[in-house]
Amino acid sequence: LFELTTSLMNIPSTSGEEEAVGFWLRDHLESLGWTVELQKVSENQNNVIAWLNDTPRVWFSTHMDTVPPFIPPTEDDEKIYGRGACDAKGIIAAQITAAERLRKDGVTDIGLLYTIEEERSSTGARAANDHPLAAKCEFMINGEPTDNDLAIGSKGSFRLKIKTTGKAAHSAYPEIGESAIEKLLDILDEVRHTKFPHDDFFGETTVNVGTIEGGVALNVIPPRAEAGLLIRLTTKREPIETALENLIRGRGEIEVLSCSEPVRMLEVDGFKQKTVRFTTDIPYLTSWGQPLLLGPGSILVAHTKDEFVLKKDLEKAVDNYGNLTRELLTRRKR
């Protein structure tokens, strides 16, 4: 389990550069006796899809890509450190290990789906959603760092830009120009003080102003500016977009980049359950049966220079994935 985790982590696979780790996974799974398909997504990007028989009812899934930069793995007696330790190469290792244990016990109605570019725009999941094997899937256990709790809900993600325009002028004569940056700052101040919808299940809608760009030079009244926002949705997108349009009042325009709405997932007795604030591939895998979300590690260390996963949590995840699969397979076929 630990060797498999570090082997995967030793292969750099930041978003857009997953080809090598996909080839490695294909070869590894084929050596174990799985039927493996590389689903082509783009010229140098492939999803990895693997199965054991013609009736794979329960599937494990997560993503092969990581955020930059590549951080090679190190380990001690308690932890594995490095990029992908918990998000999500340790999860891939735990899922494969669980699947192999199930297989040794005669459980073969299982499959594996590993996607590209979850950290960007889930292009791999979007492609996988059209795969014919999706029709055979009844339960999709997606892996993300949930502290080994079963996540029964995840917030949505609404990515957008607010763009403003002004009139360039010499900065010594601001009265003949119009500052796009000042317009944008006024709008963002109102955004920051707006109370967006609350949901009893998903919690608060939150807004992150992640990027700001604009201007030409220090001595020029800025003719253009834009800010990139990521809103963690607890409702559908429409009321949020309407609130923003009413707030902007013609002073700028909204460019929608992407949107995935909140998702409620299957509840299963016997697991500690919670909702999570982050977004996953699940909104784009709607053809793959009922979704579940479970994995080792903490989202609070994912994407950081200190990313790690506890070895005991990887071991617990193997047990969790096996127990959850057995429970799901007892349920009546749809």
Image (tube, rainbow, N blue to C red):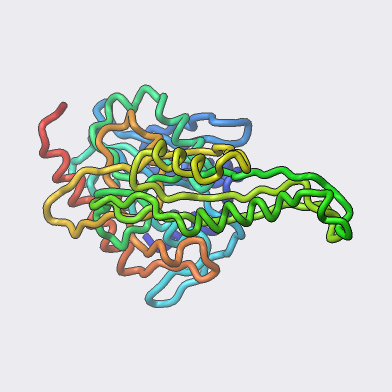
- Work out whether 116 lies above or below 67: above
Is residue 92 in sight in this rendering? no
Q: Is residue 173 left or right of residue 6?
A: right
Q: Position of residue 174 (x, y in %)?
A: 82, 55
Q: Quadrant of residue 277?
A: bottom left
Considering depth in this image, is 130 or 251 the residue closer to the camera? 251
Residue found at the very far top of the displayed protein: 132
Q: Is residue 175 left or right of residue 212?
A: right
Q: Quadrant of residue 56?
A: top left
Q: Position of residue 35 (x, y in %)?
A: 38, 32
Q: Quadrant of residue 136?
A: top left
Is residue 237 in sight in this rendering? yes
Q: Position of residue 252 (x, y in %)?
A: 62, 42
Q: Quadrant of the C terminus?
A: top left
Q: Count every numbered label the image shows and give the total.
A: 0
Residue found at the very far bottom of the displayed protein: 77
- Work out whether 279 lies above or below 138: below
Residue shown at 10%/32% (left/top)? Answer: 332
Q: Quadrant of the N terminus?
A: bottom left
Residue shown at 45%/38% (left/top)? Answer: 242
Residue shown at 44%/55% (left/top)? Answer: 194
Considering depth in this image, is 37 or 238 the residue closer to the camera? 238
Q: Position of residue 240 (x, y in %)?
A: 42, 43
Considering depth in this image, is 8 or 197 the residue closer to the camera? 197
